[in-house]
Amino acid sequence: MSFLDSLENNLKAMEANEPAGLDDRKRKEIERDRAFASAPWAEKLKRAPYTQTLMEQASRAGYQIRTKMNFMWLGDTLRLEARGHRFELRPTPQGIAAVHLKGNAELKREAIDLGGSPETLLKGWMAVLTDQKSADDAAAAQSLMDEE
């Protein structure tokens, strides 16, 4: 073993024994435990008719206001995106949480029932998107007026 290999191994061993390394390990254990506890809810979310109905209704509602809805699965989380707003269905150990986001800021969080209808949940998000569309349209009209 060369001197550099020995030095590298010693540095790695010292880093592993640092308190930050212990905090990192604990954080990873907590994340793993949380993922394990929410796994049954994640599976229900992926397989529930609620999810398919939500995506269909969101697509229809987006078409009506001429807004493209983007759907994506990020691990166990279903994300809907439109006009700079995000709406995520996140499995938690207690159930499924619906989270409304603008950028990285969380605006609202609520628990949902996969046995119910996604209509009421979607209405709230569509109201936000309609307001954003109105603001975007007004800004576009203003910029056209400024060009003239």
Image (tube, helix red, strand yellow):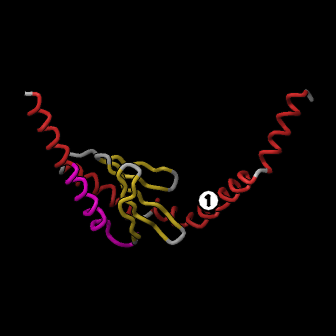
**Could you tell me which residue is drawn at 74 percent across and 54 percent down?**
19
Front residue (pair 33, 26): 26
Left or right: 2 as drawn, with respect to 31: right
Front residue (pair 27, 50): 27
Q: Please provide percent x and percent y for residue 41.
A: 51, 66
Q: Quadrant of residue 51?
A: bottom left
Label total for image: 1
Magenta portion: prevailing SS class = helix
Left or right: 24 as drawn, with respect to 148: right
Q: Quadrant of the N terminus?
A: top right
Q: Secondary structure at mark 1?
A: helix
**Could you tell me which residue is drawn at 35 percent across and 72 percent down?**
116
Left or right: 4 as drawn, with respect to 93: right
Front residue (pair 138, 89): 138
Left or right: 110 as drawn, with respect to 29: left
| Residue 115 belongs to magenta span | yes
The answer to whether 142 is drawn above or below residue 125 in the figure is: above
**Could you tell me which residue is drawn at 55 percent across and 66 percent down?**
40
Image: magenta residue range: 114-132
How packed is label 1: few (under 14 Cα within 10 Å), some, or many (20 or more)?
few
The answer to whether 55 is drawn above or below residue 95 in the figure is: above
| Residue 12 belongs to magenta span | no
Q: Which residue is mark 1?
A: 31
Q: Please provide percent x and percent y for residue 114.
A: 40, 69
Residue farthest toward the right in the current orientation of the protein: 1
Q: Please provide percent x and percent y for residue 106.
A: 39, 58
Q: Please provide percent x and percent y for residue 27.
A: 65, 58
Q: Quadrant of the C terminus?
A: top left
**Could you tell me which residue is drawn at 17 percent across and 41 percent down?**
139
Residue farthest toward the front in the current orientation of the protein: 19
Q: Tag 1: residue type?
A: Glu
